[in-house]
Image: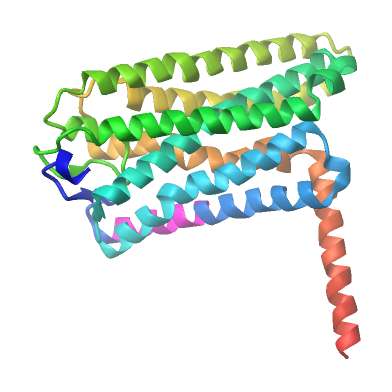
Amino acid sequence: MANSTLVTTFLLEGFAKSLELRILLSVLFLLVYLGSLLGNLIIIIVTTVDHTLNTPMYFFLRNLSILDMVYVSVTVPNACINSLTDHRKISVPGCAAQIFLFFFCACVEIQFLTIMSQDRSVAICKPLLYTVIMNHQFCVQMTLASLLSSLILASVHTFQTFQLSFCHSNVIPQFFCDIPSLLRLSCSDTFINQLLLFLTAIGLSFSCFVFIAISYVRILSAVLKIPVKGERGKAFSTCIPHIIVVSVFFSSAAYVYLRPPVLTLEVAKEMTLSVFYTIVPPFLNPIIYSLRNRQIKEAVKKVILRITFIFEYKRNEYL
């Protein structure tokens, strides 16, 4: 990597110019980050401890929560510390590692959301065939396929990005290392990189988005056939937030990654768009996919009661 670039370190942008605003935004994003970790950790614990949640739906929810904890940890803590301390430097290998991990997690996230939409579609539209279609072997195979394909894509894009030469500037107009920002800094021909991004967007992102859209159309059409209005409203209140978060995630990421490298935005707008596909999904996913779920709420209560009982027992034993 060092031979392919004239730049040995990059400089990341802070959240704002003034110290007061940097502190405010850093504290806000740290709180969102901690909320994301807490929400996802709760889901991981209850879906592991409560054996009644041993179904494909909660299998993928647990995997999504583990992924979201990694996904949000790749960018947010480092960005907040950099913004608070005004330490903006990141090494070329560090930047490459961040790009690889971020791209890997984003690709897996897209595929997990697609599989989960298929799971809900089958559960609602073909309930009698649910256990046949969404069997354990299928779930494991789809998870491994998502991880392997994302590993390959992240490796290819990271390697191809750091084959470029960066001699114009070393200031990345972003709070983390991402491919579009580096392509705009490169003084090499980025046609192959843009082509790879386009093919990935069409082959993975767009196809997954279409599949998710079809799944939710099927779900909503099935829901409209429900005679009870209360049940219909409950189903709509569950599906609509899913659709909104998925749409925001895909649209913001697509705009940032697919616009021409010559097209530049203000740093504030660039960073705002990035927040919608880096910080918002891991924070909202636990809320809209799980914590509004009655079974998850009951499982959380069971876990709290179990922990309380163990704590009281140990305390009485000690006394």
- Horizontally, residue 229 falls left or right of residue 262, namely right
Residue 14 place in picture, x, y as percent: 27, 52
Say if residue 210 shows up in the picture: yes
Question: Which quadrant would the C terminus be assigned to in this image?
Answer: bottom right
- Horizontally, residue 155 falls left or right of residue 206, namely left
**At 38% across and 36% down in the image, what residue appears?**
274
Is 15 placed above or below 87 here? above
Residue 301 place in picture, x, y as percent: 84, 55
Judging from the image, the colouring scheme is rainbow
Say if residue 229 shows up in the picture: no
Is 291 placed above or below 317 here? above
Residue 314 place in picture, x, y as percent: 86, 80
What range of the chain is rendered magenta? 20-32
**At 48% across and 34% down in the image, what residue appears?**
151
Examine the structure image and report whether residue 28 is included in the region drawn in magenta: yes
Residue 247 place in picture, x, y as percent: 52, 23
Classify residue 236 by image quadrant. Answer: top right
- Horizontally, residue 291 falls left or right of residue 185, namely right
Q: Residue furthest front?
A: 3
Classify residue 169 by image quadrant. Answer: top left
- Horizontally, residue 304 falls left or right of residue 99, namely right
**At 9% across and 39% down in the image, what residue appears?**
167
Classify residue 112 by image quadrant. Answer: top right
Q: Residue furthest bottom?
A: 319
**Dominant SS in magenta:** helix
Examine the structure image and report whether residue 138 is included in the region drawn in magenta: no
158 and 23: which one is in front?
Answer: 158
Is 62 placed above or below 190 here? below
Question: Which quadrant would the N terminus be assigned to in this image?
Answer: top left
Is 30 placed above or below 177 here? below
